[in-house]
Image: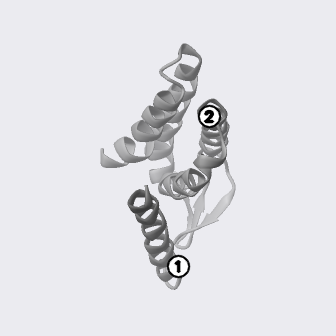
């Protein structure tokens, strides 16, 4: 349940809010939630190729990419950034349901993930503090 909220509903709400809840952003929000639900139901059962490889792009990786995108928000107008988010989320939704092999974060990759989270937290904290 927490995965669908964090990795499906939250990105859909972010998309809708950046689109000022415009009707044109509703299909995108639906696609995000539907792709997340399909990913979690089908690919959690049949999604492993082997013990180290997923079939398709895992949902939790979407949030890592979305957070990276928000570093560049100040370079765009709000309307342009909402279209960029829309496009990126549609691409990620397609990748979530694809058959592309994706390595699992494990072993030494955990250290890279922790470093990424610490750097992103520092950058966003600095941005908030400096405003």
Residue 111 in the image: state x and y as whole percent. Answer: 48, 82
Callout 2: SS: helix
Image quadrant occupied by the N terminus: top left
When the figure is inspected, residue 33 is found, relative to residue 44, above or below; the finding is above
Query: Which is more toward the observer, 7 or 107?
Result: 7
- Residue 18 in the figure: left or right of residue 55: left
Query: Which is more toward the observer, 1 or 7?
Result: 7
Q: Residue at x 49, y 23 (%)?
A: 20
- Residue 3 in the figure: left or right of residue 110: left
Furthest toward the left, the residue is: 1
- Residue at image mark 1: 112
Callout 1: SS: helix
Lower sequence index among marks 1 and 2: 2
Disc number placed over residue 86 in the picture, else none: 2
Residue 36 in the image: state x and y as whole percent. Answer: 48, 40
Q: Residue at x 52, y 59 (%)?
A: 64
Disc number placed over residue 74 in the picture, else none: none
Q: Residue at x 67, y 42 (%)?
A: 91
Q: Do the residues bearing badges 1 and 2 touch, measured as CB atoms within 8 Å? A: no
């Amino acid at each position: 349940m927490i995965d669908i909220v964090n990795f499906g509903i939250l990105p859909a709400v972010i998309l809708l809010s950046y689109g000022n809840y415009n009707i044109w952003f509703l299909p995108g929000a639906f696609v995000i939630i539907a792709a997340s639900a399909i990913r979690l139901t089908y690919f959690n059962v049949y999604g492993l190729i082997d013990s180290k490889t997923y079939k398709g792009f895992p949902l939790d990786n979407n949030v890592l990419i979305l957070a990276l995108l928000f570093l560049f928000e100040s370079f765009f107008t709000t309307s342009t950034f909402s279209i960029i988010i829309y496009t990126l989320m549609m691409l990620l939704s397609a990748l979530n349901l694809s058959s592309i092999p994706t390595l699992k974060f494990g072993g030494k990759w955990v250290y890279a993930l922790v470093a990424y989270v610490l750097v992103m937290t520092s950058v966003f904290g600095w941005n908030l503090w400096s405003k």
